[in-house]
């Protein structure tokens, strides 16, 4: 007897062709195209087991979560729904409807399809603990522990129960020395506002600086500063069980995004948004994921969700739209767009000024970039790490216009604030190497930078180039080869490697790498001219 998975001969060639086209599009991360093919070959749902899994995944990725749930329910009596994602969607649907007993049953069934995946098991166990809490209004006994994932969940669960230890748990979470949990400062502030503890909330937000805080924290601080306290509960409440599960799913999405698995990240993000559509700010990660996948049209569609009322997220939208213009057209059009919108802002904060300075720098309008960096520096504490970073950026901008005196001063001033910053050490030292200035001191700085960041390709290239300039060619080759392996598409690194190969009398290989540089789209005109000369004359002996 043939199984459904093997009965392709019963399927007409037209539907089979559409299905295979969908599989190819799905594999190439062209999800909209894949879904079109799957929709036009739905006859295969009961004819080929893997079809339903791919179809459901495509629906969720297109943010059609309710439709995906309906498809699973329509096929519930069939064996082809026996996969983890189908039961996860049924759990989410039950929670949305406040059918906690049914959600608990689905969690038990889903365990049968998560045994081989420890991450899925952790997700199910966490959901089990949440559902038990919502049902019984107490913590589950004998629960499994998944380290920080469990601690985050327990903090929100205590918030749900209005446990007196909630504040202590949030405090421990946001002060974890080994992890960056600054996101949860926002939820701590939200908890304080919800419990009318406005003084403590204000103490926390007063310590937040827009320049180095996350979007979510900046938005929360803005609401506190402007007295828009109702905004917090409009988007999230830890007394709402759907909001809690939505935040848990966002955490899972973030974990996938950190591994550059943007497809799974968006899958969980869309489930999170399904449970709590009010928390539109989470969609910033969806927009980022689409942007990194170069799916610019989808990114722009998501960005439209951010309105002028929420100033920081609206600025995020404008900034991301400008980056898309840069990617699709050019830096100058991108700058024109951001400048047009920036000019409409009456009192831009330092975060916006910083972003505008960076846009000017990327567009090579260095004088304007310096002007905006200088505006920020004027208002910063002399010993703050933020000031060190802005001095570093302004110093690098001065270096680009060959104002070396001011460049060196900014970079040295930055190092006085943060003497162990590998990237400032690298930038200043490399600038000196290029000018044939303080070579020995530059090498010492680069060796220190390499000790601090031994896997950074730019630092590896710099120290290799330093050894090249001091005629230590075998040692230089070792570093420059590694730099090329780490950054195969970087024009300068390939040019440097070509130079060292020439010095080691490997001239055919040297010309191969120089030729590669000429083919790279990011190669600047000045470097192209130098390489064209080297292709004809080689490197002249010093």
Image (spheres, rainbow, N blue to C red):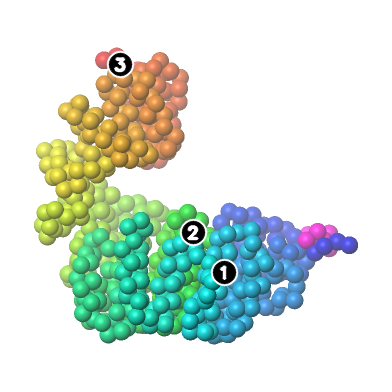
The residue that disc 1 covers is 124
Q: Nearer the viewer, mark 3 or mark 2?
A: 2
Give the side of residue 244 with respect to residue 222, left or right. Answer: right
The residue that disc 2 covers is 256
Q: Which mark is residue 320?
A: none
- Residue at 51 percent across and 56 percent down: it is 261
What crowding class fits label 1: few (fewer than 14 Cα within 10 Å), some (14-19), or many (20 or more)?
Answer: many
- The residue positioned farthest toward the right in the image shown: 1
The residue that disc 3 covers is 540
What are the residue bounds of the magenta stretch? 5-14
Give the side of residue 341 with respect to residue 160, left or right. Answer: left
What crowding class fits label 3: few (fewer than 14 Cα within 10 Å), some (14-19), or many (20 or more)?
Answer: few
Determine if residue 50 is in view.
yes
- The residue positioned farthest toward the front in the image shown: 142
Residue 369 against residue 33 in the figure, above or below:
above
Residue 382 against residue 315 in the figure, above or below:
above
């Amino acid at each position: 007897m043939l199984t459904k998975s093997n009965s392709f001969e019963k399927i007409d060639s037209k539907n089979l062709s559409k299905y295979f086209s969908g599989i190819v599009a799905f594999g190439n991360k062209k999800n909209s195209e894949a879904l079109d093919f799957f929709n036009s070959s739905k006859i295969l749902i009961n004819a080929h087991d893997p079809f339903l899994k791919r179809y459901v995944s495509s629906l969720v990725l297109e943010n059609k979560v309710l439709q995906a749930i309906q498809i699973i329910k329509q096929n519930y009596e069939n064996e082809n729904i026996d996969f983890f994602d189908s039961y996860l969607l049924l759990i989410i649907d039950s929670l949305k409807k406040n059918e906690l007993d049914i959600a608990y049953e689905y969690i038990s069934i889903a365990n049968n399809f998560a045994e081989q995946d420890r991450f899925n098991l952790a997700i199910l166990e966490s959901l089990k603990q949440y559902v038990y809490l919502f049902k019984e209004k107490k913590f589950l006994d004998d629960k499994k522990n998944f380290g920080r994932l469990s601690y985050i969940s327990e903090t929100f669960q205590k918030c749900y129960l209005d446990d007196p230890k909630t504040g202590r748990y949030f405090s421990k979470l946001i002060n974890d020395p080994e992890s960056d949990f600054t996101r949860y400062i926002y939820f701590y502030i939200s908890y304080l506002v919800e419990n009318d503890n406005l003084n403590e909330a204000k103490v926390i937000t007063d310590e937040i600086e827009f320049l180095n805080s996350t979007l979510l924290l900046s938005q929360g601080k803005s609401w506190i500063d402007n007295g828009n306290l109702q905004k917090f509960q409009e988007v999230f409440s830890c007394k709402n069980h759907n909001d809690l599960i939505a935040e848990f799913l966002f955490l899972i999405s973030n974990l996938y995004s950190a591994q550059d698995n943007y497809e799974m990240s968006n899958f969980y993000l869309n489930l999170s948004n399904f449970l709590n559509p009010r928390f539109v700010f989470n969609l910033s990660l969806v927009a980022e994921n689409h942007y990194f996948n170069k799916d610019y049209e989808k990114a722009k569609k998501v960005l439209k969700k951010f309105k002028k009322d929420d100033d920081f997220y609206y600025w995020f939208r404008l900034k991301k739209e400008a980056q898309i213009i840069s990617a699709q057209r050019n830096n100058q059009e991108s700058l024109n767009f951001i400048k047009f919108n920036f000019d409409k802002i009456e009192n831009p904060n330092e975060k916006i000024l910083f972003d505008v300075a960076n846009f000017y720098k990327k567009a090579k309008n260095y004088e304007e970039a310096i002007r905006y960096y200088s505006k920020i520096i004027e208002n910063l504490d002399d010993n703050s790490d933020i000031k060190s970073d802005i001095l570093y950026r302004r110093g690098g901008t001065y270096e680009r216009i060959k104002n070396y005196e001011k460049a060196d001063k900014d970079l040295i001033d930055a190092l006085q604030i943060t003497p162990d910053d590998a990237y400032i050490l690298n930038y200043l030292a490399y600038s000196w190497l290029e000018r044939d200035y303080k070579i020995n001191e530059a090498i010492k700085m680069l060796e220190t930078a390499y000790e601090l960041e031994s896997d950074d390709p730019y630092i590896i290239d710099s120290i290799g180039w330093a050894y090249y300039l001091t005629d230590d060619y075998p040692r230089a080759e070792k570093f420059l080869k590694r730099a090329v392996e780490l950054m195969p598409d970087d024009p300068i690194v390939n040019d440097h490697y070509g130079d060292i190969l020439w010095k080691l009398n490997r001239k055919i290989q040297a010309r191969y790498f120089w030729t590669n540089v000429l083919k790279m789209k990011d190669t600047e005109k000045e470097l192209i001219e130098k390489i064209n000369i080297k292709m004809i004359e080689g490197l002249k002996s010093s």
